Image (cartoon, grey):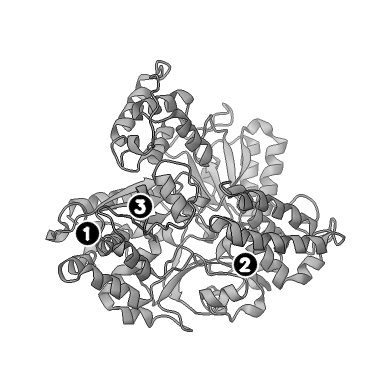
Amino acid sequence: MRCSQIHSFNIPVTPPDLSALSGEEKARLLRLVERWQNEPAALLTMILEIQEIWGYLPERVLEYVASALKVPLVDLFAIREFYDLLHGAPVPARIGLCTNTPCAVRGGGRVARLLSEALAKHPDVGLHLEELPCQGCCDLAPVAVLPAGGRRETGDWRPETGNRSITIRLTSGAASRLARALVRGEGDFVSQLKSPVSGLSTGGRVKLTPTRVAYRNLHRPEAHRLDVFRAHGGYATLERVLRTSSPEDVIAAITDSGLLGAGGAGFPTGRKWGAVRKAPGDQKFIVVNADEGEPGTFKDRPILERDPHLLIEGAAIAAYAVGTTQGFIYLRGEYRLARERLACALAEARGAGFLGGRIAGTPFSLELHLRLGAGSYVAGDETAMLESLEGRPALPRVKPPYPSDHGLFGRPTLVNNVETLAAVPAILERGPAWYRGLGRNGSAGVKVYCLSGDVTRPGNYELPRGLTARELIFTHGGGARRKTPLKAFLVGGASGGFLPPGELDIPLEIASLRAKGADLGSGAVVVVGAQSCLLDLARRETRFFAKESCGACDPCRLGTPVLVKELDRLLDPRTRSQAETRIRELGAALLDSSRCGLGQVAAFPLLSVLRHFPDEIAAHGPGRCPVGVCGRGPRRA
């Protein structure tokens, strides 16, 4: 549906006075509205692009958009207030610091203290510190987001380049240099630092392994270009499938391969495709979940930036199998390079006849559109993502009905993760038996594991499903960084659980991990060294869920803040027993009654510490932490 058709009712709006805008601002605003107003599922993307004009969304601008699209102004205000990347006022200049576990265990707390002390002593610098969610480059932790340019003398930190910010790896040594540069009033301090992440290069380092499926082209230079992709067999599988295989044949092959969803739930891909195929309806949709927001997860970013045509090929095959001619890629708003590469790849594919009408000379047609998220962890839930595409806050829907029956705009919808779809061409090229045989310990196929934290060789590893944590961390990752003792490893990102070294031989597969109070999730594995405090890390994850709760259901909205308070009571031996009981009760209630996965797993990290690390808890007391992190002085930011 078009932007102006996404709401169930229209309210006449008096056209606003745009005389306060400059001629250039007004022209850009009118061009953007004209460009997007008749595009499907484009309201949020349009609002993001409008915000790029001013850096925030002035009320008069939203009034104009409401008038042009004939939608209630209150709906646009609701969107602006819900998403973290949208702003209702000019945003103060900031230094953003990631506060999640992968950055914390690599010294993020010391970085925060160094910068906090420098800025507190020199408020005239005109910058403030801000906590940020995971930035999707955990292999380069600790990560910070800095202004791209500016001058201290004028207090103007607006960038002098096209980017509003730059994301870098900020070690404690680099933070010390940055603090000195800020104090001395050096405006171009970014040039003194190393390891740029955003812009023309990113995180998401890939450690190539023999079992390459979704990562099959990442060793090739310039693989994001259509000519390079085609030179190595790109789109050949799509052409063959469209000419020689029925949709039912494709679904049967994917089912036989044992391919599981790679976004977190691990649902069998073939079953999901079959359900959408069988669902009645003359219009269906495919949605690619590229909103990679799980802390510790950075596996999809390399595909999006370096091999976008493989994703398009896999999505086109999936669309053919389920019977849809319309699709959307929902991309995380912070992934700027991925946005550029995807937009270019979609245009190239369309120009070469691999998107649009009569693909490869067959009756099959597909339009695939790029749409942007705007900063919401809960939008990773498939039903919340559909709400976002429809131009509303990303609030999860009650299930059933499921998207396979009642999805985008009420039509049957297939939602698949980037990694899942990128594996499809190789499976159909080499056969389902080949893919199934790549797994171990009863698991089928391969998985991309995101290894980060206190490990020697962090990065993305595409390896057999079912391999052990020991093999991933020590054989491939090189063991704990600086040969420090391994205290724990977090499996599944924020949605998973901490496991002790005694569980290193556990297979990294769903059933085995769930039996230990963890989960494979999206494949994040964070190594925790002896210098980290597990209660501090559990607090970070619990605070993250409390902040990201959308408030749509009472158990999550009310329960996650209580979890944070009860965690603090664990520090006091006098209230510890009551706190442990209360945390277990809350965890069970959240799991049973929350609307979506966020609330259901919010207590998992804390419950895993209670289960596997009682000695760590017992070593804490008022003002006392065994490693001096959470019980003495300021906590790590």
Q: According to the image, label 3 marks what residue?
A: 329
Distance from the alpha carbon under mark 2 to that under mark 3? 30 Å
Distance from the alpha carbon under mark 1 to that under mark 3? 22 Å
In screen coordinates, is 164 left or right of 68?
right
Q: Residue at x 70, y 48 (%)?
A: 113
Label 2 vs 3, first from the N-terminus? 3
Q: Residue at x 64, y 54 (%)?
A: 108
x, y (%) of residue 417? 40, 61
In screen coordinates, is 515 left or right of 443?
right
Q: According to the image, label 1 marks what residue?
A: 227
Residue 305: which numbered mark, if any? none
Residue that sits furthest to the left in the current view = 361
Q: According to the image, label 2 marks what residue?
A: 497
Label 1 vs 3, first from the N-terminus? 1
Q: Quadrant of the N terminus?
A: top left
Residue that sits furthest to the right in the current view = 574
Which SS class for mark 2?
A: strand
Callout 2 environment at 10 Å: few (<14), some (14 to 19), or many (20+)?
A: many
x, y (%) of residue 180? 65, 42
Q: What amino acid is labelled 1 in the image?
A: Asp
Q: Is residue 634 visible?
A: yes
In screen coordinates, is 206 left or right of 469?
left
204 and 293: which is toward the camera: 293
x, y (%) of residue 326? 27, 52
Q: What amino acid is labelled 3 in the image?
A: Ile
Callout 3 environment at 10 Å: few (<14), some (14 to 19), or many (20+)?
A: many
Q: What amino acid is labelled 2 in the image?
A: Gly
Q: Are marks 2 and 1 in contact (CB under 8 Å)?
A: no
Q: Are marks 1 and 3 in contact (CB under 8 Å)?
A: no
Distance from the alpha carbon under mark 2 to that under mark 1? 43 Å
x, y (%) of residue 18? 40, 18
